[in-house]
Image (cartoon, rainbow, N blue to C red):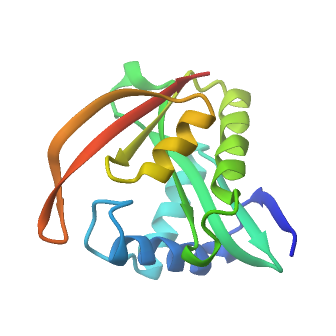
Amino acid sequence: MEITYRFAQQKDLPQIREILNHAIAHTTAVYDYDLRSENDMQNWWKTKRESNHPILVATENNTVVGFCSYGEFRRWQGFYQSMEHSVYVHEQHQGKGIGKKLLAELLNEAKRRNVHVLIGGIDADNEASIRLHEKLGFSKTGHLREVGFKFDRYLDLVFMQIIL
């Protein structure tokens, strides 16, 4: 099957929510415990639209199999050209290059929108995501030890960045 990449539409939110909630419930890709509600996703969508931050999706047969976006790294004015991104791929579609293509598309979109730095916060044990970022030109810029806690254990967070 062919994977297509495009800007997300509001109708994609239920499938995006399913992918995100799986990551929350079963992985350390996001250090959160609470699953997102439909209302949470609508608010997320609204915030992204108002901030002019893109949401990209990968689809197969009109089914969302991955998504990515970026948002403010920090809220202070001096950080307005630095964004933190996230990339999620449905667990049945991981390892097929979808995350790499999504992130590459996001990098292009960030450049088009004059973002200067894109930053990723990645669980230190997520070697696949770290390798993916390195392949696309990101560098490790920090390692914070035991700053997260999930699944009854402390987690290390690696920061990676690329200057666009």
Q: Quadrant of the N terminus?
A: bottom right
Q: Which residue is more in the foreground, 140 or 50?
A: 140
Q: Residue at x 51, y 24 (%)?
A: 81
**Residue 31 at x, y = what percent?**
28, 60
**Residue 144 at x, y = what percent?**
21, 37
Q: Residue at x 48, y 34 (%)?
A: 83
Q: As drawn, is 84 to the left or to the right of 97?
A: left
The vertical placement of 100 against 78, above or below, is: below
Q: As drawn, is 152 to the left or to the right of 3?
A: left
Q: Which residue is more in the foreground, 86 or 51?
A: 86
The vertical placement of 13 against 143, above or below, is: below
Q: Which residue is more in the foreground, 29 or 48?
A: 29
Q: As drawn, is 29 to the left or to the right of 139?
A: left
Q: Residue at x 35, y 76 (%)?
A: 26
The vertical placement of 152 against 159, above or below, is: below
**Residue 113 at x, y = what percent?**
68, 30
Q: Residue at x 55, y 52 (%)?
A: 48
Q: Which residue is more in the foreground, 10 or 120?
A: 120
How many numbered callouts? 0
Q: Quadrant of the C terminus?
A: top right
Q: Residue furthest right?
A: 2
**Residue 2 at x, y = what percent?**
87, 69
